[in-house]
Amino acid sequence: MIQLQKPKLILDNGLRLDGRRPDEMRPIRIELGVLKNADGSAIFEMGNTKVIAAVYGPKEMHPRHLALPDRAVLRVRYHMTPFSTDERKNPAPSRREIELSKVIREALESTILVELFPRTVIDIFMEVLQADAGTRLVSLMAASMALADAGIPMRDLIAGVAVGKADGVLVLDLNEPEDMWGEADMPIAMMPSLKQVALLQLNGNMTPQEFRQGLEMAQKGIETIYNLEKEAIRSKYAEYKEE
Amino acid sequence: MSANKIYFEDRSIVTPGDLIAEGDFQIPWSPYYYKIGNKYYSAITGLIEVKENLFEIVPLEGHRYFPKIGDTVIGLVEDIEIYGWILDIKSPYSAYLPASTFLGRPVTPGEDLRRYLNIGDYVIAKIETYDRTINPILSIKGKGLGRIANGIVIDIPPIKVPRVIGKNKSMLDTLTNETGCEILVAQNGRIHANCATKTIEEVLIEAIQIIERESHIKGLTEKIRKFLKEKLGEIKNDSTAKTEANT
C-alpha cells in the first residue's frame, strides 16, 4: 500500500480520507483482563490501531543492585509484532521501539505511585498487534488500563490523542496517510482529572496559534477517551451495582 | 471542618483519579488514596464505603499483599540461609524468618537448618518488623504459629481475604461448622485447612473457589451454606450406601 505520491488528505467536502470530520476521532474499544497469566492486562483499539498490554508486579527486583531504595523501577517494553505493519517488521527491537519504550516509561512514571513500593520492579509489556498511526498513545493508554486492572495505585488514568496538520487543516487523531503526508503530528497524553500533561511530542511545523488550537482540540478528545476508559473499568464490575 | 464533602455515594465504584472528597478527614493512611492540598483522589479501582464523615476504599483488584506489622501470614520457604529462612509471602518483598526465633535458641555455627524447615514447607508466622527500608521479618512466637505439618494450603488473591472471613466471621464460621475442618485464613491470601477426609477437603476448596469468583454477590454466606450442605450430604449418602452394599 506504499503510495509514492502524496494523496489529497482533505477532500473537497471538507472530510478526511476515511470520511471523518477534522475534529472527529476514530472508534474506540477497550477491554480489560484479557490475559489470565498477567497481573493486569488490557486491549486498546483506536480505529485500526490495536495494542495489547500486560503488567506484572510490583515484585522483587533481580538483579538486586538495579533496585532503587526509594521507589519502584519500571521496566517498559513497547514492541511491534512482525505482522502489525503492511510489510513484515523485523521482530528485533528497533531504535524507534527503544525510544518509544523510554517515552512511555517516563509518562507512566508520572502517574504510578512508585514511591509506595521501594526496591521493587513493575514490568509492563505492550505489543502492537496492528499499527495504523498513533501506536505510542494507544500503547500508553493500554498500559494505563492494564495497570488499573492490576490494582497498582496510580494518580490518574492516562488518556491521549494526537493532533496534526493535513493540507493546512488541523485534524484530530491522525490515521496512517495523514501521519505520513501531513505537515505536523503532535501526540498529547494527559492525566485529565489532575489537568496535567504526561506526554507531548511535536513532529513537523505548527504556528503558536495552531499549537494552542490543537491543544484545545486534543483536550476535548482526551475528555471523551477518559470517560470511555472509566466506563470500561466500571463495566467490568457491572454486577457490583446490580445487587 | 464544616466544608468536608464526599462526592461519592456509599458502595459506588471509583477509578484511579476520581476526586473522592474535599476537606480535612481523620482517616488512616492507605495506599488506595492520595491527597493533593485538601482534595482526596482515588488511586485504584475500588468500592467506596462512606460512613458519615469518613470514607474507606476497598480495592477490587490486587494480586500482592501489602505487609503490615502484626498480621498473621502463611509463608512458603523459598531459600535457606546460614541463620534463617527466606519465605515467600505473596508480597513484593520476601520475608525473613530468623532461625533463632524459630528454634528458641541461638544457632550453632554450621548447623543444618534444613532439618527444621526445608524448601517448600509452609509456615504460619506473624510479621514482627517491616518498613519501607527493610524486608518483613517474621516471628513464630505465639499460639498456633509454626511449621504446617498437615492439612492443605489454598491460595486466593489477598484482596478476597475479608470476604472469606465475612462480617463478624460469618463466612468463616459457616465453613468451619459445615465441614468440620480447622481453618486459618492468613492476611496474605493463604488459607490453611485441616480436614477429616480428602473428600471434605475437595468440597472446601470448591467452596472457597466459589467465594473467590462471586465475592461481590450479596447473600453469599447462605449460598455457601447451602452448597456445603448439599455436597456433604451427598458424600454422607454415598458412604452409607456403600457400607450397606458391603454388608
Image (spheres, rainbow, N blue to C red):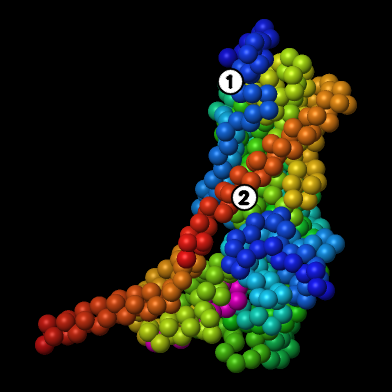
Q: Secondary structure at mark 1?
A: loop
Magenta span includes B187: yes
The chain containing the residue under callout 1 comes to A
Label annotation for residue A230:
2
- At label 1, counting other C-alpha atoms closer than 10 Å, the crowd grade (few under 14, some 14-19, many 20 or more) is few
Question: What amino acid is at disc 2?
Answer: Lys
Label annotation for residue A19:
1
Q: Secondary structure at mark 2?
A: helix
The residue at the point 54 percent across, 85 percent down is B168
Q: Position of residue B3 (x, y in %)?
A: 80, 69
Which of the two discs, 1 and 2, labels the residue nearer the N terminus?
1
The residue at the point 75 percent across, 79 percent down is B129
Splitting the image into 4 quarters, where does residue B157 fall? Answer: bottom right
Q: Which residues are magenta?
A: B180-191
Q: Position of residue A98 (x, y in %)?
A: 74, 35
Closest to the observer, A130 or A62: A130
Instruction: Give yes or no for contact between labels 1 and 2 (Cβ–Cβ under 8 Å).
Output: no
